[in-house]
Image (tube, rainbow, N blue to C red):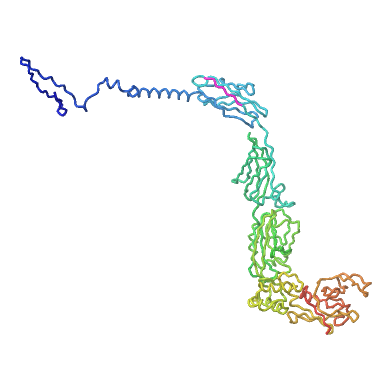
Amino acid sequence: MVFDDLAGTYHADIVRPTLTKTRRPVRPLPMPEFPEPSARPRRASERDVKRPLLRRPGVVIGGAITLVLIVGAVVAAWLTNPVLDLRGPRTLTAAAAPELRLDVRHPASISADDISATIDGEAVDAPAIDIDGSGRIAIQAPKLADGEHTARVTVRGAGLTQRTLRTSWSFTVDTVAPATRVALPAAGKAPVGDTTYVPAGTIAVTKQPLRVQVATEDGASISVSSTVAGSPREQADATGPRTAVSITLPEGAQELIVRSSDPAGNTTERRQKVIVDTTGPKLTAVVPTLVRDAALNLPVAISDLHGATLQVRMNGVEIENAVTIVSRTDAPGAADASSDGGGTTADGAEAAEAAGDDDSATDDGDDADASSDDAPAPIAARVRVVLEEGAFEGRHTLELIATDSLGSKTVQKQMLVVNSTESLSAATGLRVGARGADVTALHKALLEQKAGTKAQLLEDIQAKTYGAATRAAVKSYQSREGIDSDGVAGATTISALTLRIVVNLSTHQLTLFSSGDVVKTWGVAVGAPEFPTPTGDFEIQSMQKNPTWTPPDSEWAKDAEVIPPGPDNPLGTRWMGIDGTVGIHGTNNAASIGYSQSHGCIRMRIPDVEELFELVAHGTKVSVVAA
């Protein structure tokens, strides 16, 4: 029998027996019917026996639902479980009779009767215990002493399960405020005695930020602020004996507030009145780059709510008595120290306008500063800057320094060139930067005195300028003549270079020369034959107005007495010493002029000697010749 896989059927070959006897014919067996392999279903028994129980769909879904129900029940029980939470005070309180605060989560139906409390073992009265519908418990403690205390609270019948809740804790009562001392910088205090602009008990602050030193207990929190709305607040924690807090305050009058709070919340507050003024006075000055007046005569306006004064420096050196007040305005209530009743306003607007008016210094007819040293500074003033001795021609650095009564400053610094004259003999002095005909005359005098060569001075000569070469030549001449060698041609240097006095004993004449030219000749009296005037080359060594006559150490004056200035003084009104006790001076005996009648000095009429005195200077050469 052969099975045909492809046909899916059996074929039977009939084998005929060799037996001879008669046999019954064999019928083929019926073929079983097999389904296609892909469509063959599994028996139910196979499906149920071979698959795990947990992978059966019905079992998984049922288990998940059961688990969710169990977890939900646990969570619901946990969420609704009553819990007692402490809200305060936890560890520290500044209240002597603090309120103990607790929360009951899921309280259900608790009343005050269900709550009891003790503090340090003492029961709290029932009326002092309260609870609201949300489970917030408030227990008013009695007055407690400073120190540590223990509280115990019991809540009965809380939640759906009617639980009893208990809690206990310790806390400290601290009702003592921290001791606090505040120190401000000494440099910020107002000038001693000045109460016009700084009221008593008020401190002036002129530098920012202000550094405040606070001494308080360790652990305290420090706060520094101002009473001015919107101003900053600075905070710091106290560490060590002193804690520094820096704060930038708004300008103006205010109170500085310093608070120190300890961890319990006790606060100490200190207040200090302050005036904050970190800006200097308003300063308006008209200072041209080229000044034609050796005295400068500059109009200046200053103003400040706290009063202002003006200081003048020329080339780094303060010039005394250079400021003349034209008009002033004082603060209300201040002593009236004005010279003309004022006329300016506190904001200095009119003063600033006056600063540009070159004639304003003479409008009032009384330019003197009428204020005394004790008078407060004006809050606004028009002034004039005038140099009594005049500025040397040339380049200068001028500084105007306005200072208010609190110490705040405003500085105006400017370079300027003074060119006041073209005559060397009329010049107050010359320095680097000077220019013009007077400098040319100086160059000529330096060449004549062989203080420099033309080649060395050529560039300055061509530019008619007092430059570096001119300064070097002046220093060389000064060093040779024993004059302070600063390279500035002052009155002494100019006089020595250009001026020369020649006294002719035979003609009884004194002639003043400037750069070889005759300035003027005056008649004089000279020494009598027994007291001859010494001849030779000298220089003016001393100059004095209204001198006192002191008898010389000489036989003819042994019985004489000192004669003070006045009409009886034999020296007149001026003295110019040239050689020990010999000098050029005035006389109260004008009849002696033109004769040899003195004790060796050279006498001049009073008007003549006063005129000569203004034309010469220390160091002016004096030659006394016999003929």
Q: In the rendered image, which quarter is residue 626 located in? A: bottom right
Q: Nearer the viewer, residue 512 or 131?
A: 512
Q: Position of residue 60 (x, y in %)?
A: 35, 24
Against 625, residue 54 (above or below) is above
Can residue 384 be seen at all in this image of the molecule? no
Q: Nearer the viewer, residue 268 or 332?
A: 268
Q: In the rendered image, which quarter is residue 57 located in? A: top left
Q: Position of residue 589 (x, y in %)?
A: 87, 78
For the N terminus, the quadrant is top left
Q: In the rendered image, which quarter is residue 442 located in? A: bottom right
For the C terminus, the quadrant is bottom right
Provide the residue span drawn in magenta.
Answer: 163-169
Can residue 193 be seen at all in this image of the molecule? yes
Against 580, residue 324 (above or below) is above
Q: Nearer the viewer, residue 578 or 479?
A: 479
Is the magenta region chiefly helix, strand or loop?
strand
Q: Nearer the viewer, residue 155 or 221?
A: 221
